[in-house]
Amino acid sequence: MNEHVIPWLGAYHDGELHGGRLQQVEEHLAHCATCRAELGELRALAALLQSSPAPQALTRPDHFVAQVGLRLPRRPVQPAWKRCLKAGWRLAPVGLLGAWAFVRAVFLVSGVVLGALQVGLGGDVIAELLPASQPGLSLTRLWSLSGASLSDVGRVALQLLGNGGPLGWGVMLKVASLALIGLLYWSWLASWWAVRTRTSEHQRTGY
Amino acid sequence: MSSRPAPPTDAELELITQAQQGDRRAFGELVRLNREGVINVVYRMCGDASLAEDAAQESFIRAWQHLPNYRPRSPFRNWVYRIATNVALDVLRREKEAVDVDAVSLPSPERGPESMIEGKERGEQVQQAVLSLPPASRAVLVLREYEGLAYREIADALGIPIGTVMSRLNYARSRLREMLTPYLEVL
């Protein structure tokens, strides 16, 4: 309580103190004549500064606005296609999110359908909905049609390749599409960050 | 300390958007709305009314040129004040002899109280005392005392931390109290 609060009086006078600090200053002022005198001087100084007359307007407001208007340099107006491109770039994350949701939904539905088929549920309905399945033209089949002979290892490798690797085309497609969406999203994020940093720097140094 | 400055109002935002797209009429409206404050800031910074009008026009022209870079996170007024302060500092550098700090006559304690209470003279002495402050402290003082900006707004307008706003303001007030003691005693 004995410690003066002079360093905080300016902020107190300007109404910039809150919470505990405000309470501390107010409690101290109630008991300390020195700090009250200091605050009085700050208030007197503010009143004195206000007594200094404001500049007399030399130009009428509308005249001033007109003069500024005449001195404004020409600034190229952004063409519509550029504005659309800019808006599209800003909306890119929404599009990517939509694509991600779509891919997930497609694979979820196909997973459910395949699961149902495996346990023998709704087979007839699905068979009616889907076109008659063609015999698969796997790479091994194509190879055998060409008349060439294959070793067992080669046959297995081609079989795997034909089915999209050990996990199958479905999983490969899912991973690839999600990875592509992720890559596009991170690229957008990186370019957004670069633009933001450049703009902040520009504003800091040159408005 | 202080909260973030409020963003522009919807009407102001509309004008800013139109002006950013090259609408001179919308920009003219922004000039009309902020003219008085900008002239006042420049005048308090450089102390010459005609110079202040020229510098205020220069500030608005710079604002027009940089408008595409303006992001309306803080009031347009603060952004223009920042430009106006920089323009005023440029003017001071160019016209250094016109407001030479060494040539500023500060109030003399020997002068009689009769002359001190002359309103006009007192105003001039106050203005000269303000002009004798270092430009960095003067800018903070002008934005606080004459434009009533909050600390956060001053920090935002001048691109400095709030702690620096406080220390510069304390310094400016302390200097002014020393220089204007005779007038403070009269009040």
Image (tube, coloured by chain):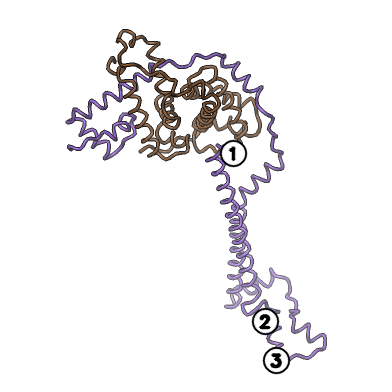
Chain colours: A purple, B brown
Alpha-carbon neighbours of circle 3 within 10 Å: few (<14), some, or many (≥20)? few
Q: Nearer the viewer, residue B153 or B86?
A: B86
Q: Secondary structure at mark 3?
A: helix
Q: Determine which residue is flagged by label 3.
A: A152
| Count of marks placed on residues | 3
- The quarter holding residue A124 reads bottom right
Q: Secondary structure at mark 1?
A: helix
Amino acid type, label 3: Asp
Chain letter of mark 2 equals: A
Q: Where in the figure is residue A125, as x and y percent of width and height? A: 65, 70
Farthest residue in the top direction? B114
Can marks 3 and 1 be said to lie on one chain?
A: no
Farthest residue in the right direction? A146
Q: Where in the figure is residue B90, as x and y percent of width and height? A: 54, 29
Q: Where in the figure is residue A123, as x and y percent of width and height? A: 63, 74
Amino acid type, label 2: Leu
Alpha-carbon neighbours of circle 2 within 10 Å: few (<14), some, or many (≥20)? some
- Which residue is depicted at the point 43% across and 20% down? B104
- Which residue is depicted at the point 50% across and 24% down? B42
Alpha-carbon neighbours of circle 1 within 10 Å: few (<14), some, or many (≥20)? some
Indicate left or right for A133 with B102 as reference. Answer: right
Q: Determine which residue is flagged by label 1.
A: B69
Q: Where in the figure is residue A162, as x and y percent of width and height? A: 71, 79
Q: Determine which residue is flagged by label 2.
A: A160
Q: Secondary structure at mark 2?
A: helix
Amino acid type, label 1: Asn
Q: Is residue A34 above or below residue B163?
A: above
- Which residue is depicted at the point 61% across and 73% down? A114
Q: Nearer the viewer, mark 3 or mark 1?
A: 1
Chain letter of mark 1 equals: B
